[in-house]
Every structure is written in C-alpha cells, then in structure tokens.
Image (tube, helix red, strand yellow):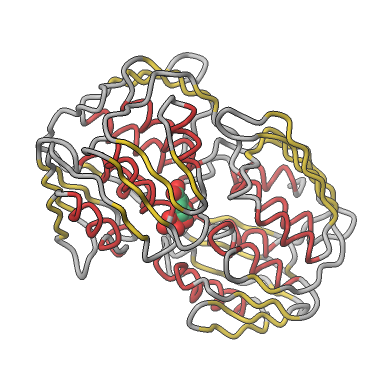
C-alpha cells in the first residue's frame, strides 16, 4: 500500500482520533487480570492492540466484541491457561514486554514471537528484572532479540529495580509481574515516563505507592473488575496538531483526546515553536484525563528538545522533526538514542527522509540538528515498516512541492486505522 500526498490547501478540521494505544493495551491486561467482566469502550482497533487481545485469548481469557464495538473481557484472576502455540505479538513491543511481566509469574513456559521489526528489538531490558524476580527467560534471536521464551514461576519475589533506561514498557512489565509476586516490588525510574499503568492500576482498585520516581506495588493485589473508556490517542492527534501548527491560518480541534501530562509534551513544544493552542480538560479521572485541544497555525521557529522532555514525546519525535524542518532557525533533538530501537531506527530514517525532501539535517548519535526553513520537495519514501515514520512523512508531504509517495503503509494500521481517510478529508481530495 502507498499513501500519496500533495501540498495541503487550508487545513481546517474538527475531529476525534482513535483510542490511545498504550491505554488500550493496559486496559485489556488489567481486565484480563481482574476477577470479573470489564467492558472496554473505544478500545483501539489497531493491529497492535488487537494483537494483545489475540494473545490473551490464546491464554484462555474470554473476550467478546459487543455490537456497539465494546469489548467485554472476562478476567481470569491472574491465572492464565498454558498454550503450546507461540504467542505472536506482531509489531508490538508493548504487547511483548508487558505480557512478559504477566507470563513470568505463570506455572508454565511460553514463547513470544514478533514480526521482522519486533524481532530486532532488545529484550535484555525486561529479562534482567524478571530474572531477578525468579523467572527464567531466554531469547532465540540475534543478540537479545525475540523470539522470547519465558519459563514462568509461581514464586516470583518482589524486587527494588532501578531502570537503566527511561522506559514505560519496562516499568510496566516489572510492576505487572510485581502484582503476581511475593512482597513489595519497587521500580525507580531515572526520569518520568508515561504513567498509564500506575493510574489504571489505581482505577482498577490496586493501591500504588508513588514517591517521586519511585513506584511500588504489593503482590497479591489484583485488579477489580471495572468498565473503562479509552480516551483518544494524543500520539495520533500529534500528526494533525503539527500539520495545523505549521500552516499559518490553519485551525484544528481534536476532541475527547487523552491529556495525561506524561504524554502532552508535544503541546509545550509546539507552543515554544510559536503555535497558538488551547488545552481544555473536560474530565479528570479516576483513570485518565480527557479533553479538547485547539490549535491555530503560525510561522514556527526552531527549538531544542532534550533531557526529561524526551520520554514524554518519545513517539512524537518523527513528526516534531518534520515541524523542525518547516520552522525557521535551528531545531536540536538530543538525548533521544532510544529512538534507534523503536519500530525502526527512527533517528536514521527521519534524518535520511528529511534530507531526501531537501531539508538540511545532521544526524547525531542521540538525535539530530535540523536547519529549518528550506523548501521541501515531494519524493518517494519507504516507511521502513514503521507506522510513525509513514504518518510523519505524510504530514511532511502536505508542505512539499509536488507529490510525496510513502511506500509500504500497511504498518499505519498498527496504531491509526483510518489515518489515510482522515488525511484525504483534511486535504479535501
Ligand atoms: C509505550 C512506551 C514507549 C512508547 C511505546 C509505547 C507503552 O516505549 O515508545 O510506543 O505503552 O508503554 P518505551 O517504554 O520502550 O520507551
């Protein structure tokens, strides 16, 4: 599949985006761990999150799709049923790493596999803490890459673990294992990462102690069955927010979108770059804050994105780099080495693609320097099988001379079914 894009006429839209990917995964996992039936509304029907449901079903969790699109998950109170088959996590690092936490505490062996991209992603980061808790894990791929074989143990021991990388997936993996372990499990993160697991555990009735970046749970406290409504995904909204921000006179409203402060870093960055925007929180929890974002385009200027801000915008860096190329002045991205082990090496691919479109970019080991403001030209670009690359460069194409063709865009389905239709509607094609 391909996405073809031309320069956008005036961008004006009032939209909703599909359910949040991170929150959808967690809602399914916590519902599966619960002791009753949970109805999940606005669950993301992207490949990644449907993959999590498929894996849970393989492990004996009964999940029914209702006529109104709601998923009813019948929890198994923390006890999965062994399966001989591989558990295919597709393209989804979150599925593999979070499931690993739960499977580490089961009295059986499981084998988790993934597609080519997931089979190149590092698993050492979860093998180490789960090993310390008493599970046995090994990888069958090159280096520390999947397939991942987990020999679970019903006598996991809680640990205190300092995350060597700022990763919400690793934090969540350890906390989920901690629920099924003996005693207290504490994770200490170097900087704040998305806190959906903590918030949703609390929503599902599990006490979570938080003291700065120290997060603890006590083993044996399982989620209680609750219904949950997934907010729209701000990482999906990010594409339209950047498109609107970069076009003076544009106006985009996104409704019912998640406004969790560990995910809204993009808004602060766009404000710094000169966009005008308004965030309005309509409901605050328990659970996840939700509201409306309105953005008005203006001439953008370059900025520096670094340090603590990086985990907050980890999935938005490709489209923020596009914003940097469209802005005047220099945009510097640093401390973002983690992007090299995402669905693709996002630093290398973004730097290459922006350069191919005519931007002036210097790739660095942990980021890039973009000298913005040069005119972009439409070219043919590969997605590298990475959904966020495909969508970020579709947005770049809205500002380029001539036609931009993004190849291999099937991957967009992992997080944003309906993206191409929304793009067409927005550009009146
Ligand atoms: C996610 C955490 C981030 C993010 C990914 C989803 C999550 O990954 O990039 O898209 O749901 O916990 P890391 O934890 O590896 O940074």
**Front in this rendered view, residue 194 or 324:** 194
* Location of residue 197 (image quadrant): top left
* Location of residue 217 (image quadrant): top left
Residue 58 in the image: above or below residue 415: above
**Front in this rendered view, residue 50 or 153:** 153
Residue at position x 39%, y 35% in the image:
50
Q: Residue 328 location in percent, x, y?
A: 80, 76
Residue 299 in the image: above or below residue 95: below
**Horizontal side, residue 83 vs residue 96: left or right:** left
Can residue 410 be seen here? The reply is: no
**Horizontal side, residue 356 vs residue 407: left or right:** right
Q: Residue 268 location in percent, x, y?
A: 73, 58
Residue at position x 50%, y 36% in the image:
199
Q: Residue 253 location in percent, x, y?
A: 78, 41
* Location of residue 308 (image quadrant): bottom right
**Horizontal side, residue 115 vs residue 325: left or right:** left
- The image shows a total of numbered marks equal to 0
Residue at position x 32%, y 63% in the image:
121
Residue at position x 78%, y 72% in the image:
327
Can residue 241 be seen here? The reply is: yes
Name the residue at the right extreme.
249
Q: Residue 59 location in percent, x, y?
A: 21, 30
**Horizontal side, residue 93 vs residue 267: left or right:** left
């Amino acid at each position: 599949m391909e996405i073809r894009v031309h320069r956008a006429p005036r961008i004006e839209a009032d939209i909703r985006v599909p359910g949040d990917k991170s929150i959808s995964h967690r809602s399914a996992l916590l519902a599966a761990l619960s002791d009753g039936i949970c109805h999940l509304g606005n669950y993301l029907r992207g490949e990644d999150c449907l993959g999590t449901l498929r894996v849970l079903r393989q492990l004996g969790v009964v999940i029914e799709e209702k006529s109104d699109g709601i998923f009813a998950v019948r929890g198994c109170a923390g006890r999965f049923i062994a399966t001989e088959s591989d558990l295919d996590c597709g393209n989804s690092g979150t599925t593999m790493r979070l499931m690993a936490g739960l499977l580490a505490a089961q009295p059986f062996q499981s084998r988790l596999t993934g597609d080519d991209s997931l089979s190149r992603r590092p698993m050492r980061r979860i093998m180490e803490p789960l090993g310390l808790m008493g599970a046995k894990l090994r990888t069958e791929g090159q280096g520390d890459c999947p397939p991942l074989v987990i020999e679970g143990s019903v006598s996991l021991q809680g640990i205190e673990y300092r995350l060597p990388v700022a990763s919400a997936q690793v934090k969540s993996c350890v906390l989920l294992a901690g629920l099924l372990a003996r005693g207290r499990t504490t994770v200490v993160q170097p900087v704040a990462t998305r806190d959906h697991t903590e918030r949703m555990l609390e929503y599902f009735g599990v006490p979570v102690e938080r003291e700065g970046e120290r997060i603890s749970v006590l083993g044996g406290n399982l989620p209680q069955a609750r219904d949950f409504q997934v907010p729209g995904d701000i990482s999906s909204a990010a594409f339209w927010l950047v498109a609107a921000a970069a076009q003076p006179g544009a106006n985009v409203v996104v409704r019912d979108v998640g406004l969790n402060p560990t995910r809204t870093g993009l808004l602060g960055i766009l404000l710094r770059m000169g966009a005008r925007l308004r965030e309005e929180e309509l409901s605050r929890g328990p659970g996840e804050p939700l509201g409306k974002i309105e953005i008005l385009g203006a001439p953008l200027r370059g900025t520096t994105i670094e340090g603590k801000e990086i985990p907050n915008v980890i999935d938005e860096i490709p489209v923020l780099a596009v914003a940097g190329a469209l802005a005047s002045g220099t945009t510097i991205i640093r401390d973002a080495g983690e992007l090299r082990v995402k669905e693709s090496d996002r630093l290398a691919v973004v730097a290459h693609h922006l350069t191919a479109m005519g931007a002036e970019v210097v790739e660095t080991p942990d980021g890039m320097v973009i000298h913005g403001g040069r005119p972009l030209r439409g070219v043919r670009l590969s997605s590298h099988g990475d959904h966020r690359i495909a969508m970020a460069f579709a947005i770049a194409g809205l500002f380029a001379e001539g036609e931009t063709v993004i190849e291999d865009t099937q991957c967009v389905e992992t997080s944003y079914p309906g993206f191409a239709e929304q793009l067409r509607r927005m550009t009146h094609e």
